[in-house]
Image: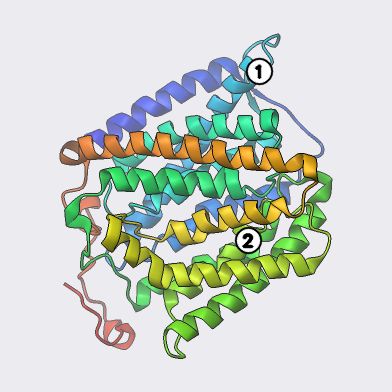
Amino acid sequence: MAIGLPIIALVFQVILLVFYTAFGSVENKSSFDFSMFEFTHLMIFVGFALLYGFLRRYTWTGIAQNFIIGVFAAEFFILYASIITWIHASAKPFEVRLDGEFLIRADFCAGAVLVSFGAYIGKVSTAQMLVMAAFEPLFYAVNEHLLVDMIKTIDSGGGLILHAFGCYFGLFASWVFSPEKGKNHKLNSTNYNSNIFAVTGTVLLWASWPGFNAALAGTDSYYAISNTVFGLFGSTVSAFIVSALINDGKLGMVSVINATLSGGVAVGTSCVILHQPGWGLFIGFVTGGISSWGFEKLTPWLEKTIGLQDVSGIHNLHGIPGIIALIFSLFLVSSEQIAPQIYGLLCTLGLSIASGAIFGLFLRLTHEKIGPEKFFVDEIHWIDCNSKQKSVHEPLMKPINDDRD
């Protein structure tokens, strides 16, 4: 396992370096909006990272794996998307094209891969995740091309292309992989300090999401921004309501951290065609409640009944809201657009489930060779980490009934 990481990383980077050096070109587009790119970049490499610091003994590794997975996924996506563009427009010479839109699309792809990572965070090695960062973007790029260029599905905020694809790839990979010893693991838990990381990531994601949904909206960016703001308003209110109802008036941190964001996913598909903010507020409100219920009730039920382990609950934040986004879009598009919306959903589910199952088989086959020796533990990944070490401040910060080993 120790040797696998540097070898895989070096081989992948050399391959990418050859392609970028031999065929790379940079195109300067005056229309490129750097602020939209920065919102997207911050969400992927800061917001997601902090959100994945939620495990009490896996904070270092969750944040670091997010970093390297996102980098390689973006690099590989640009290569794959360039190849697909070249094939689609066969008269042009092949080039790995870099422009502002490609950079944003690469971050969207990195986001999808990081969504998938959430299903089995803590149970996989960084080496295995590097393979995922090279494998999943190929299918993501194919799905994006089919939906955007061929089927013409409306999905500017990525409800299907990013969130649903990343979720169902990860869920089916986890289901096929699904080692029994990962079930009901005592270290698959949070504590007071790790949740501070996660909720900080939530606040950053929540504030940046309007720019994220608007990044590829072009001249319709105002609609995307305003509808996403109202979608997030709605999901935040309903997440608090449902969590309090389920927990006898108290709040569950898992819902506050995650379900509050679901409105941003749910309005992503139709954010540019909504011209009345009440729709965005309604979609977000419905989705936030369903997402909160999913985190509190559905995820443990699925693990108990069918053995589906979803460590960070991606089904409730990305999968279900992505499907809701598609369903609501059917009531908002023209009658001629309904079929492309449905075909986009079927294509996304088919490609994500099939490719995710294949990757899950890879995880199962490599678990003994390059997989982690223990689950949900930072120490096996770092030379200078001891998450059991007590600091002078720990008596003040330690929550009640915090079970440290």
Vertical comparison of 405 with 385: above or below: below
- Please, what is the three-letter code of the amino acid marked with disc 2? Gly
Residue occupying the point 70% across, 11% down: 92
Left or right? Give the position of 60 relative to 273.
left
Q: Residue 69 location in percent, x, y?
A: 42, 43
Q: Is residue 49 left or right of residue 337?
A: left
- Give the residue pinned by disc 2: 264
Measuring 44% from the left and 35% from the top, which residue is drawn there?
136
Q: Is residue 109 above or below residue 391?
A: above
What SS does tag 1 mark? helix
Across and down, in percent, residue 295 comes to: 43, 68
Extreme residue in the bottom direction: 249
Tell me which corner region of the image, top left, top right, bottom left or bottom right, holds residue 403: bottom left
Residue type at the position of mark 1: His
The local secondary structure at tag 2 comes to: helix
Q: Work out whether residue 168 or residue 4 is closer to the camera in this orientation and state it.
A: 168
- In the picture, measured across the screen, residue 197 lies left or right of residue 152, that is left
Q: Position of residue 363 (x, y in %)?
A: 27, 39
Residue that label 1 marks: 88
Left or right: 363 as drawn, with respect to 82 = left
- Badge 1: few (under 14), some or many (20 or more) residues near its Cα, within 10 Å? few
**Front-lying residue, 245 or 110:** 245
Depth check, front residue: 282 or 80: 282
Query: Is 78 situated above or below 249?
Result: above
